[in-house]
Image (spheres, rainbow, N blue to C red):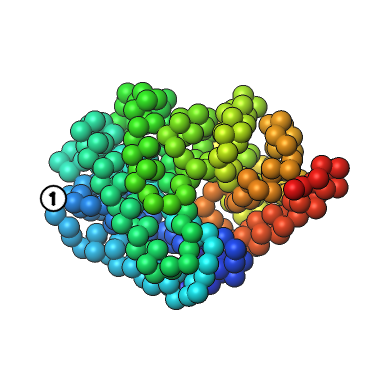
């Protein structure tokens, strides 16, 4: 979410998504509130520190880690206060093991942990323990919550394809085998005492690997989904996985309803999708393309922004959450209009 006030962000989330709130992340606060640093604050027996390039493993805890832990503690205090008496699903987010290994440097070198299989194993074990402890803390603070733990893996396709650059940038680290990726994901997913989701808003999401790793749900950017990848999504849905479908752009609209997205070689301009009805219809069209019974859509789909909203203005971030809720509420009625009864 945009902004730096955890209490205000939590109130916005709870107000717009009263049936399925989440613990906001506020990266505008700086190092320690970012994806890698926030998760590093939770790691067990693996301290980290900030460098000019990002985060790296450290020999002992320091002020960078203390700051990250302090910000997370403030976030959890706000969560506890705003959600007093809450019952229902509540989502937490952590950096997944492979993105963490691709962004966290080793202690004495500038190479990322992904370059060292032993470091990856230690990091994954530490993250699994951290996820379990974090979930237990939130369960104590909000005892009526049904926890959903999401592991963010934006770099997962790059890890599998061997596209993570070395420190020099002149070459790339070797691709990680699919079975190894699956096992690492499974270790952290199995440790979290909650319904688990793996989120990847990149292209070429490895849906099959995520499913085999034991995730309860998949979260992805609908605009990045290619026709050739839809079979993997359909297989996951038929196996009962939830689909957190990123149907609302996470970037702000430009004047005239045009949004600009930075891409290699320039800026792509596309029309900003319409309101809640259009969003709901996008999800229904996906269900049709996947060949799934429309009656399962309201039960199995969660409508979400495509990715994080930190780059949006506060009003637009609030509007995006409101559209998620409104579009989800429309799904049964729109499906009924097509002649498919929802049971």
For label 1, the crowd category at 10 Å Cα-Cα, with few meaning under 14, some 14 to 19 and many 20 or more, is few
Residue hosting label 1: 59
At horizontal 39% and vertical 25% (from top left) the residue drawn is 178
Image quarter for residue 317? bottom right
Residue most extreme to the front = 343
- Image position, residue 235 (x, y; %): 59, 30
Q: Nearer the viewer, residue 311 or 260?
A: 311
Q: Is residue 153 left or right of residue 303?
A: left
Q: Is residue 78 above or below residue 209?
A: below
SS state under label 1: loop
Q: Nearer the viewer, residue 274 or 336?
A: 336
Q: Which one is nearer the viewer's eye here, 1 or 119?
A: 119
State the count of labels.
Answer: 1
- Write the residue at 54% across / 48% down: 307
Residue 253 in view (yes/no): yes
Q: Is residue 15 left or right of residue 152?
A: right
Residue 5 showing in the rendered view: no
Q: Position of residue 66 (x, y in %)?
A: 24, 64
Could you tell me residue 167's position as x and y percent? 27, 34
Question: Where's residue 220, x and y in %?
Answer: 56, 41
Residue at horizontal 52%, vertical 32%?
A: 207
Height in image: 8 above or below 238? below
Residue at 37% across, 37% down: 186
């Amino acid at each position: 979410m945009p902004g730096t006030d955890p209490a205000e962000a939590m109130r916005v989330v709870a107000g717009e998504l009263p049936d399925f709130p989440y613990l906001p992340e506020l990266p505008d606060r700086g190092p320690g509130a970012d994806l890698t640093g926030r998760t590093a604050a939770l790691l067990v027996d693996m301290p980290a520190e900030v460098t000019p390039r990002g985060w790296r493993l450290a020999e002992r805890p320091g002020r960078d880690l203390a700051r990250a832990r302090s910000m997370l503690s403030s976030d959890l205090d706000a969560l506890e206060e705003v959600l007093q008496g809450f019952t229902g699903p509540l989502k937490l987010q952590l950096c997944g093991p492979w993105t963490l290994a691709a962004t966290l440097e080793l202690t004495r070198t500038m190479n990322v942990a992904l370059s060292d299989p032993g470091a990856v194993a230690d990091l994954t074990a530490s993250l699994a323990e951290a996820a379990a402890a974090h979930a237990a803390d939130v369960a104590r603070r909000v005892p009526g919550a049904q926890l959903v733990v999401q592991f963010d893996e934006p770099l997962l396709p790059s890890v599998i394809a061997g596209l993570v650059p070395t420190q020099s940038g002149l070459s790339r680290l070797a691709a990680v085998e699919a079975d190894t990726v699956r096992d690492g994901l499974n270790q952290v997913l199995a440790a979290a005492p909650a319904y688990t989701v793996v989120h990847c808003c990149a292209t070429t999401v490895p849906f099959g690997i995520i499913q085999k790793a034991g995730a309860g749900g998949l979260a992805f950017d609908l605009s990045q989904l290619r026709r050739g990848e839809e079979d993997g999504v359909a297989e996951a849905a038929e196996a009962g996985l939830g689909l957190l479908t990123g149907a609302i752009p996470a970037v702000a609209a430009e004047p005239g309803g045009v949004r600009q997205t930075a891409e290699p070689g320039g800026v792509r301009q596309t029309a900003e999708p319409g309101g809640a009805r259009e969003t709901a219809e996008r999800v229904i069209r996906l269900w049709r393309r996947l060949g799934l019974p429309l009656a399962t859509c309201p039960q199995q789909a969660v409508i979400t922004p495509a990715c994080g909203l930190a780059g949006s203005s506060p009003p637009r971030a609030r509007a995006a959450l409101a559209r998620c809720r409104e579009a989800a509420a429309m799904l049964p009625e729109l499906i009924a209009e097509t002649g498919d009864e929802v049971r």
